[in-house]
Image (spheres, coloured by chain):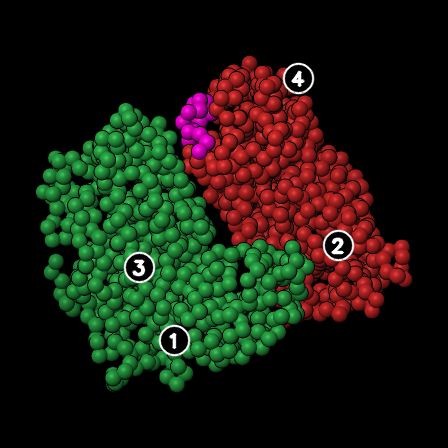
Chain colours: A green, B red
Amino acid sequence: MAVEQNQSVESTTDVLIIGAGPAGLMACHALAKLGIRVRIVDKRPEKLIAGQADGIQPRTMEIFQSYGLLERLLKEGNQIHTAAFYNPNAHGTIELTDRVPDVTAPTARYPFEVTLHQGAIEAIFMDSMAASGVEVERHVAPVSISLDEAVARVYDKECYPVKASLRNLFNGNLEVVNAKILIGADGAHSWVRKSLGIAMEGEQTDYVWGVIDIAEPESDFPDIRNKAVVHSNHGTCMVIPREGDKVRVYIQLDDGAVLQSIAANKNKSNGRIDMTKLAVGPEDLLCVAQKILHPYTLRAGGGKFEWWTVYTIGQRVASQFSVHNRIFIVGDACHTHSPKAGQGMNASMGDSHNLVWKISAVLNGWVDPDVLDTYELERRKYAQDLISFDRKFAKLFSGKPRTEQYQDGVSHEEFLQIFQTFGGFTSGIGMRYLGSTITDADHTNSTRGIKVGERFPPRPVVRAADSRPMDIQDLLHSDGRFKVLVFLEGEKEATIALEALSIELEHVTRMSPANNLFAVTEVLTFIAGTGDSPRDVLNWTSWPLMLRSHWSKIFVEKPDGAEYSPEVIVVRPDGYIGKIIPSHSLESQLSNYFSGFLRKKTQKSTCYIGPGLDQS
Amino acid sequence: MAVEQNQSVESTTDVLIIGAGPAGLMACHALAKLGIRVRIVDKRPEKLIAGQADGIQPRTMEIFQSYGLLERLLKEGNQIHTAAFYNPNAHGTIELTDRVPDVTAPTARYPFEVTLHQGAIEAIFMDSMAASGVEVERHVAPVSISLDEAVARVYDKECYPVKASLRNLFNGNLEVVNAKILIGADGAHSWVRKSLGIAMEGEQTDYVWGVIDIAEPESDFPDIRNKAVVHSNHGTCMVIPREGDKVRVYIQLDDGAVLQSIAANKNKSNGRIDMTKLAVGPEDLLCVAQKILHPYTLRAGGGKFEWWTVYTIGQRVASQFSVHNRIFIVGDACHTHSPKAGQGMNASMGDSHNLVWKISAVLNGWVDPDVLDTYELERRKYAQDLISFDRKFAKLFSGKPRTEQYQDGVSHEEFLQIFQTFGGFTSGIGMRYLGSTITDADHTNSTRGIKVGERFPPRPVVRAADSRPMDIQDLLHSDGRFKVLVFLEGEKEATIALEALSIELEHVTRMSPANNLFAVTEVLTFIAGTGDSPRDVLNWTSWPLMLRSHWSKIFVEKPDGAEYSPEVIVVRPDGYIGKIIPSHSLESQLSNYFSGFLRKKTQKSTCYIGPGLDQS
């Protein structure tokens, strides 16, 4: 397209996001709600109407809840509570081997998976963003990015080190956007990643899978509304029920002709399959599934397929997730893996959730820019773990089932053991971040069974002023603030801890922007209830004012064990535990934690000059 | 206003509702969702922005849930879980006597009250109605109603026996609306009721109460976020927390000067107080409350009152609730009582909820018009019970507290006993409708502890096809259909019952409109699970097709007692139990129940001529 350079315009924004899939939208939505000036562009002209990823894991639901988005997800989505396993029987057809809970993470607040078409999930973000005045700019693609490294560490109100040229694909116009931060959320074939020269490490597997989405399935398969993993003598498939009556079927392809056609239409350099030239269609994939599912039947009502694709699995992680903490990549742009464990969209949104509050806190001048280092530290480690899990799982998945005739095959017990052992991992619940300035692993276990680096688990409490039962997770809104959870014993025992706490909170206040404790933290107090009913326990008005900035900040918790003692737990803005302090050693520990990353007052509040760099 | 008669236009509608308060809107919303052609008019030019009723009881929440409206109510409303009682102490000030659960109905699904300003509740209905294309026509008042009694019992598509003239108060234009049904929901001073000459039976009490809504209360009263009933030597008041930080205070007035001013400005004929001429303002009311609450303080932040009023309590019930089953009155138009037990809005919406499905079923030609008789039968009885409860409660409320000096006063124990004894009543949960064609009291108790005439209680079950935990109440949508709940034992024992059931369902099918069982009923099946986990229990595909019109219609219930046996329970479209049949005596009982009120096929499907009336 021939466009005159002088048609270009120039503009500024705080954060520019390339790609409006789940990872990009999660980031954009969160930043918009945090009050950051943000734009998001996508080269697709229309929003997604079918297909792509569809599984939401328990931890992702907790994250949605922290943004106030879960209600709609649950209203629109399908729930998977049970996983069923089918294997070959003596007659050479399949039979039910086992049914187990689909989610095996004991602390999961929502112990099930939700399936919902990716476009519907994206719409949840878009509708909520629209209330903040932010919309996806479509049919817009980046043509170049550059970073002014000399000022990459200058965090100044007027310093925009990232320059991105965007082309409007409708009219060909160019726009030069000057941004403080750029996020590449542009998928497995990320243009941003490639233009930065970031390599993907790992390999492409030989496994070829087909996927069909059937809108009106007709079936007598008893587990058509459960997740069903079917190993047969004719191959392997997985049934995933979806919203409404829809069903998705993943089918491993090992038919020679099919594989040949796919190989012939595969781009050697990027692994992409040219679907338009393929000698295989959704009817062929269904036909394979029908053989695997025999003696049960599965038909597509009206012969209609909502969506279908074939793909090979790449198991790769980007060598770096950031360039000078000014350009970041998130989601499929930094990790690709098989869809078997339903991780893709979850890992991607998890990246953004991890990143956004750090960006917001840095741009607001609240924390040291070094905090941004923890994004790669935390998320790249996770992506690597994900890939190595995926290798094991995909291999088992693709292996032939063990039968009397084929003793080398994968037994159901073997498969189930992996499925359940990794339950904490696949659910996202068991993930634990490494130690860093924001995750202080000095004292790692609370007497409440809570661990530094993990997400704060659900925990029932009762609000003191109105006896309303609540879950602590619902107090941990993703609002960009650190939550200081003060767990105290009854009124008498608490007085000593209160004195030390008061001094510590005073220190943190002096470190806080504008000397306002509540700019970056929220203090929530939980009193151990001694009676059966919180109604008898306490008059909330008798607690010191520092603990009750509002009547809604004091709670009663029911002790659930003997060695349950007073402590202070700091939860990061993304819901992960940053610090656990037993109340007997409160002194200087709380303030030391915050001084490890809160921006020093001696620095200008809007400007930070990195070591060895001059600001001109 | 002089308006030429020839400016009037004439129109038709199925149902015309006069009055868009909670009762009218509940009726209008439900009818619109049931597909009935409905209009609603209100003489007020604007929607309500503050004041009026604000308490939602547990049963009303269950009803909201059945219409899909509860989520928003819970999101916007405040929850009251605890009731606190204060009484005079030896120092002559008040002190806490007791804190108890605010709701004492053991089966309540939502064991708390919700408070939310009436305008916000009305908005929930209006927003949902708007999706069905129905809006409130404001500044429109009725000027005359007439009923053509000769054709009152002719249910014909083109027969509109009710004629109402409406005046548009904006431009003075008249419209003559011909309706099949008219609902008067126009409040305690109902124009509809008066124009029909329906008397109110009962009396006006001498109790005078003041109400203030404080948007930003400043208080050290520990129960400012609970319902607090305060009896002091200086009078009685009640604190009701509201959405946000708002608080409402009800104050019983017994100051001579205040009562004198009120008496002087009270309309002798209708009991209305002319607020504009009153020598009392919200500051005076607050001043009384402050004396009662001493030693605790209560101030109105910024001196602002959101709303206030004074009123006397009338305890009256209309002598009839309907004229020829063509004109109905609902809500305050047929019963008035004190607001102490938070019943007003609930009783009103309960009237409409009871009435609407009957209107819909009659207008659709599904059931005999006589079914409409049950509205007055059921709701007038309830209103009478409500008034006699209110007499007891208001008297106790207004009585002086018992102290050492005043031994004739009301003791806390006495008060609490009444408060808790009537918990089932005030919550709406314990209400039980009398026997009638639609409520067959032949066999009144199920082995599940469920009683004919009561609302179907919450009950956890698991959906067989996808192991999703659900509550039976969530299957009982207010969709105008009778729910046939089939409770079966395990597969083997069930076969005999299944045979009888099949014959019965066949009978009901032949009675149903267009021989379609699902036009007026929905069949839901619950299989007693024998194992710990429903995953092991059954393959839902093995049950007969008549029980699974869709995969989502079969459930597993966990038996919770020994004498738990198979039975069929019919739930009316409003959630109340119509019939309980032990499965061993299924024969003809199910079909007899339905034949008691389903419209006979020998009648023309769109026309019903009452006894002794000719259709010309």
Element carrying mark 1? loop
Q: Amino acid at mark 3?
A: Tyr
Q: Amino acid at mark 1?
A: Phe
Cα–Cα gap, marks 3 and 4? 79 Å
Which chain does the numbered disc 1 sit on? A
Q: Which residue is mark 3?
A: A382
| Residue A86 place in picture, x, y as percent | 32, 34
Residue drawn where x is 33% and y is 29% of the image: A95
Which chain does the numbered disc 3 sit on? A
- How packed mark 3 is, by other alpha carbons closer than 10 Å (few <14, some 14-19, many 20 or more), is some
Please name which of the two marks, 1 or 4, marks the residue nearer to the observer: 1
- How packed mark 1 is, by other alpha carbons closer than 10 Å (few <14, some 14-19, many 20 or more), is some
Which chain does the numbered disc 2 sit on? B
Cα–Cα gap, marks 3 and 1? 23 Å
Marks 2 and 4 close (CB-CB < 8 Å): no
- How packed mark 2 is, by other alpha carbons closer than 10 Å (few <14, some 14-19, many 20 or more), is many
Cα–Cα gap, marks 2 and 1? 60 Å
Cα–Cα gap, marks 2 and 4? 47 Å
Cα–Cα gap, marks 1 and 4? 86 Å
> For the residues tagged 3 and 4, is the chain the same?
no
Task: Give the quadrant of the C terminus of chain A.
Answer: bottom left
Please name which of the two marks, 2 or 1, marks the residue nearer to the observer: 1
* Residue A239 visible in the displayed image: yes
B538 falls in the magenta region: yes
Magenta stretch bounds: B536-552
Q: Which numbered circle lies on residue A597?
A: 1
Q: Which residue is mark 2?
A: B311
> For the residues tagged 2 and 3, is the chain the same?
no
